[in-house]
């Protein structure tokens, strides 16, 4: 394995990941590497043994790490990767920049990326999962990105290679996205900030923002995000079919489907990853039994169970 002395970033073996995820669950990674900058990440990837898997991790807002941990090197980007630059209608953001920060800085410059304001997580995760809300998606604004490949090469990646789809992309295996360039449309800064304030208020009224959750648990069966419009059709929204299956408020151990929004899974305190995943699978079974619909996870689940 690489000597930490050869790196400018921080390499930690057997690093517990629970404190790095919003749901506060999960066992240790074989290694956690926090690179100082792009060049440091490139050096690390070049020296990494081929038999070690790489798992890029954002702020852990949409992630369950199983209780047995992750047999991989987790790459977590920090301060060297959170810059935001605006040039005309184009915004280039480091992969570690928070979605909300990007939306606000863009709005200051009169660039409309307001849909990002209420999305939890960082730009790297938004690109990887084609995050979206209010009828807009990352794919709609993505121009290009820079990745460090598993071999340590820095190269540009475009929308065609990523093949954006609802809540998924084809990010190259083992690659780490380090920045993304997005193109918004023009807007008045005051109006954009007012719109985001209204979105935040609506989110707080309808979602359990004060509870420990990871955002939406399941993808909408219809394959599109909520538009926020009054005429939005709700018959095939995940929360609706979960309600119809009688699973609002359902519990397994310390895990619960929120009473406030039934597509939000929360850790009420002391939940394990097994509790959370087990509850999710129970919800999927009940929804299938009641409606014939198979819900697909939106939360990423990685790692091994404790008993493995």
Image (spheres, grey):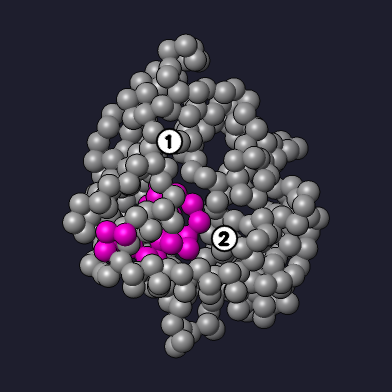
Residue at the limit of the structure toward the front, as seen here: 190
Q: Is residue 67 left or right of residue 57?
A: right
**Frontmost residue, 88 versus 165:** 88
Q: Is residue 246 left or right of residue 92?
A: right
Query: Regarding mark 1 in the picture, which secondary structure is present there?
Result: helix
Q: Residue 279 carries which label?
A: none
User: Residue 125 magenta-drawn?
Assistant: yes
Residue 7 appearing in the image: yes
Relative to 157, say whether 296 is above or below: below
Residue at the limit of the structure toward the bottom, as seen here: 231
Q: Tell me where residue 291 sits by quadrant.
A: bottom right
Residue drawn at the location 49% of the way across and 52% of the way down: 121
Q: Assess disc 2: are there few (<14), some (14-19) or many (≥20) residues with their C-alpha within 10 Å of its C-alpha.
A: many
User: Residue 115 magenta-drawn?
Assistant: yes
Q: Mark 1 points at which residue?
A: 79
Residue at the limit of the structure toward the left, as seen here: 88
Residue drawn at the location 52% of the way across and 22% of the way down: 11
Q: Between label 2 and label 1, give the one nearer the viewer.
A: 1
Spot occupied by residue 164 in the image (x, y as percentages of width and height):
34, 58
Q: In this view, does 147 lie to the left or right of 242?
A: left
Q: Quadrant of the C terminus?
A: top right
Q: Name the residue under label 2.
A: 215
What's drawn in magenta, residue-wise?
108-129
Spot occupied by residue 28 in the image (x, y as percentages of width and height):
64, 32
Residue 66 appearing in the image: no
Relative to 49, say whether 168 is above or below: below
Q: Tell me where residue 247 sits by quadrant.
A: bottom right
Say how many tags the image has.
2
């Amino acid at each position: 394995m690489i000597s930490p002395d050869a790196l400018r970033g921080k390499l930690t073996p057997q690093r517990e990941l629970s404190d790095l995820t919003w749901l506060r669950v999960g066992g240790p990674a074989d290694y956690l590497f926090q690179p100082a900058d792009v060049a440091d990440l490139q050096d690390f990837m070049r020296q990494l043994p081929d038999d070690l898997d790489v798992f890029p991790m954002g702020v852990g807002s949409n992630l369950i790490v199983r209780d047995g941990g992750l047999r991989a090197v987790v790459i977590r980007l920090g301060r060297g990767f959170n810059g935001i630059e605006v040039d005309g209608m184009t915004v280039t953001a480091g992969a570690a920049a928070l979605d909300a920060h990007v939306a606000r800085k863009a709005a200051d410059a009169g660039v409309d990326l307001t849909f990002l304001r209420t999305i939890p997580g960082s730009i790297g995760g938004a690109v990887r999962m084609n995050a979206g809300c209010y009828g807009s998606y990352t794919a709609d604004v993505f121009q290009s990105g820079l990745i460090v490949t598993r071999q340590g090469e820095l190269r540009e990646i475009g929308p065609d290679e990523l093949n954006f789809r609802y809540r998924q992309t084809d990010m190259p295996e083992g690659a780490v996205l380090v920045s993304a360039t997005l193109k918004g449309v023009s807007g008045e800064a005051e109006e954009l900030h007012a719109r985001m304030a209204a979105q935040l208020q609506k989110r707080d009224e309808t979602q359990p923002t004060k509870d420990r959750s990871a955002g939406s648990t399941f993808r909408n069966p219809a394959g599109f995000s909520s538009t926020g419009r009054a005429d939005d059709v709700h018959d095939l929204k995940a929360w609706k079919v979960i309600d119809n299956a009688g699973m609002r408020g359902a519990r397994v151990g310390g895990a619960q489907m929120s009473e406030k929004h039934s597509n939000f899974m929360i850790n009420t305190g002391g939940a394990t990853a097994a509790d959370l995943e087990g509850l999710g699978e129970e919800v999927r079974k009940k929804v299938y039994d009641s409606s014939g619909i198979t819900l697909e996870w939106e939360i990423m689940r990685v790692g091994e169970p404790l008993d493995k």
